Amino acid sequence: MKEVKAYGAQDKDAPLKEMNINRRDLLDNDVSIDIMYCGVCHSDIHAKLNDWGNAKYPIVPGHEIIGKITAIGSNVSKYQVGDLVGVGCMVDSCQECSACKEDQEMWCENGSTSTYNSKDPHLGGHTLGGYSKVIVVREEFVLKVPTNLETKAVAPLLCAGITTYSPLKHWNVKKGDKVGIVGLGGLGHMGIKFAAAMGAETVMITTSEEKAKDAKRLGANQVIISKDENQMKEHNDSFDFILNTIPVGHDVNPYLALLKRDCTMCLVGAIEPLENVHGANLILRRKKLAGSLIGGIKETQEMLDFCGEHNITSDIEMIDMQDINNAFERVQKNDVKYRFVIDMETL
Ligand SMILES: [Zn+2]
Ligand SMILES: [Zn+2]
């Protein structure tokens, strides 16, 4: 066991502060990673505040991890010391169930192990995330990071990136499709970049006039202001796919109206009750309302390679580790363009 520096909170009301945590000795399939950067995801804040009722303390958040491998176990075959790698939302799964065999480890039937806040099968207690100097992970859950991209801006791809890439691929978004991205935050800004890179006619759907300009800079061809009923009506029954990134419960009916017959709107943000869905909005024209959660390891690697090819990274604002409590407050106010990344040198 090795003691390393980390940043975490002792309970839901306590600020995050420096602490020491233990990382396991390398098992045969493990790699040890010196963490260079870690993104700040809205889930980190929900978890710390116990919004989902499953928090374990002390909590060390962080699941958008980039670093360099410093040691490998005796059976590691994919990686070498010095490799630039990433770790996302998961660090383990059974590797044997039908979900794992189909590369959908996030839905492992025996429960995948999250990067933080999951039962730790090795050290006991619970897993501790990327707001730390070092992490030890089995090689199956480690991703290769393209070296042509700006390294620190790759970190948010490990959660915000795969969360938006996976549904766009699953619903087969392609050149010429009209794709709507609802909500412009950490997820939405990646959704625009991916949909545009896939060749779709990409439409930002936002409440905010201010965000319209930024959406275009990020690659949107068009912007619809959702509060303007006439603008919304003009686009009724015209979308091939809508990716809805709004992070809270809301009225989905106005967005369902925008879909073409037989087409789908996928939720990736709101893990909470929605307002009443009007059945007519689904039944007439056979429309579908769906959801999606991150993506498997194979698809996460495919997403990173796609980013390497298309030169896609997240728009980020760098912070020192000591600024994290202020950053949490700013994320809650949606005051970041579009992702904070912690420089782990500062810990
Ligand atoms: Zn996340
Ligand atoms: Zn499994």
Image (cartoon, grey):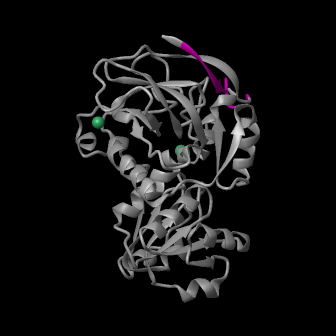
* Depth check, front residue: 187 or 94: 187
The quadrant where residue 5 appears: top right
Where 137 sits versus 289, above or below? above
Q: Residue at x 48, y 70 (%)?
A: 196
Q: Is residue 25 above or below residue 336?
A: above
- Res 282 visible: yes
Magenta region: 3-14
Which quadrant of the figure contains the C terminus?
top right
Residue projecting furthest to the top? 1
Residue 314 on the magenta span:
no
Q: Residue at x 59, y 73 (%)?
A: 205
Q: Does residue 7 show up magenta in the picture?
A: yes
Which residue is drawn at the image coordinates 41% and 68% (left, top)?
198
Number of numbered markers: 0
Could you tell me which residue is drawn at 70 percent across and 53 percent down? 336
Comparing 274 with 345, the one in front is: 345
Above or below, 226 against 84 in this view is below
The x and y percentages for residue 327 are 72, 42
Q: Nearer the viewer, residue 168 or 108?
A: 168
Can residue 112 be seen here?
no
In the rendered image, residue 248, in percent from the top left (x then y), is placed at 60, 56
Q: Residue 129: where, in percent of width, then height?
A: 54, 30
In this picture, residue 123 sits left or right of residue 75: right
Question: Observer-nearest residue: 58 or 251?
Answer: 58
